[in-house]
């Protein structure tokens, strides 16, 4: 589960994002503060070997708290994160423009509410239904996923903030997935939240993809069964020589299903 599709010896991006979010959440989301922004830099491949994460309180104000975290492996940094935590308060008055059409979750018949990890569902504007087979959505239209993320630490169910970080890393997948697979590898993630996700799954819907000269930027909206609750943005660099087609992901899903049966 923790191995990247770019290399079996490389730790997958969601695992690092989840690990950093877990440390920041555990050590700094206290005294009524809630995490509202997480930025992760994935600048060096973390290998499938022991690693650790340490955090630092950068600022401790009355309404805003800042904290940093870093993943270390073999004495060198492999990834880092910064978080902004705020004290909730009352809403100001007035009408504000917002996105006109909000993302729609899959039906409960297709994606029943569960309390635990499960394989993601995929959907695209060119497909009629949600499904677990990525190859059914390998086209040039907008993509979205519905996820019940895996545990970051074995035997420990992630907090809502960690679940959001795990799901948000799929912004790279839904924004960089072309009609011929995924050819960009993301180098970061920025997640902004107005509330924590609630039980029943987390969706990620692509808002935009921009790319030029092998550099890409993608944005997405995060949602659950109660509506949209956050936004995510990634930057990415071309890895076209190791393009990942959806058929490879189909094989992984089939193997996982066979292992469970």
Image: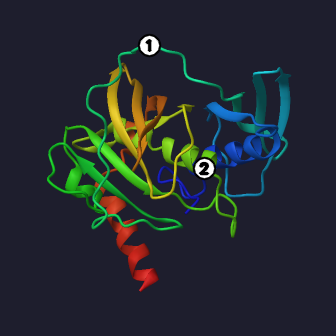
Chain-order first, disc 1 or disc 2: 1
Label 1 to label 2, Cα distance in Å?
29 Å
The residue depicted at 26 percent of the width and 50 percent of the height is 123
Vertical position of residue 61 compared to residue 244: above or below: above
Tell me the quadrant of the picture where the C terminus can be found: bottom left
Q: Which residue is mark 2?
A: 160
146 or 213: nearer the viewer: 146
Instruction: Residue 76: give x, y in percent of width and height.
Output: 80, 38
Q: Is residue 38 visible?
A: no
Tell me the quadrant of the picture where the N terminus can be found: bottom right
Other residues around mark 2 within 10 Å, as few (<14) / some (14–19) / many (≥20): some
Instruction: Residue 42: give x, y in percent of width and height.
Output: 61, 35
Count the marks: how many? 2
Dot label at residue 62: none
Q: Is residue 48 left or right of residue 128?
A: right
Instruction: Residue 6: give x, y in percent of width and height.
Output: 48, 49
Q: Quadrant of residue 64?
A: top right
The residue depicted at 62 percent of the width and 43 percent of the height is 17
Q: Is residue 1 left or right of residue 210?
A: right
Secondary structure beneath dot 1 equals loop
The residue mark sitting in front, 1 or 2, is 1
154 or 106: nearer the viewer: 106
Q: Which residue is mark 1?
A: 94
Q: Is residue 96 visible?
A: yes
Instruction: Residue 150: give x, y in percent of width and height.
Output: 56, 61
Other residues around mark 1 within 10 Å, as few (<14) / some (14–19) / many (≥20): few
């Amino acid at each position: 589960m923790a191995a990247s599709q770019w290399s079996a010896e490389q730790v997958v991006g969601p695992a690092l994002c989840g690990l950093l979010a877990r440390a920041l959440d555990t050590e700094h989301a206290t005294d009524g503060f809630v995490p509202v922004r997480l930025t992760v830099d994935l600048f060096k491949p973390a290998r499938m070997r022991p690693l650790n994460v340490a955090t630092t309180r950068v600022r401790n104000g009355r309404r805003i708290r800042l904290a940093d975290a870093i993943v270390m492996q073999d004495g060198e940094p492999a990834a880092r994160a910064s978080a902004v935590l705020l004290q909730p308060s009352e809403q100001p008055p007035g009408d504000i423009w917002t996105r006109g059409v909000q993302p729609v979750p899959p039906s409960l018949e297709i994606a029943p509410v569960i309390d635990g990890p499960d394989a993601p569902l995929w959907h695209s504007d060119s497909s009629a239904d949600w499904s677990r087979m990525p190859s059914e959505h390998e086209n040039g239209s907008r993509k979205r996923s519905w996820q019940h993320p895996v545990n970051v630490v074995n035997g420990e169910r992630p907090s809502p903030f960690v679940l959001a970080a795990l799901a948000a890393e799929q912004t790279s997948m839904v924004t960089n997935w072309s009609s011929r697979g995924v050819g960009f590898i993301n180098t970061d993630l920025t997640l902004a939240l107005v509330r924590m996700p609630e039980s029943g799954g987390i969706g990620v819907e692509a808002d935009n993809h921009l790319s030029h000269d092998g550099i890409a930027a993608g944005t997405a909206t995060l949602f659950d069964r109660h509506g949209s609750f956050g936004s995510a943005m990634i930057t990415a660099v071309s890895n076209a020589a190791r393009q990942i087609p959806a058929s490879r992901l189909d094989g992984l899903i089939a193997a996982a299903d066979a292992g469970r049966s």
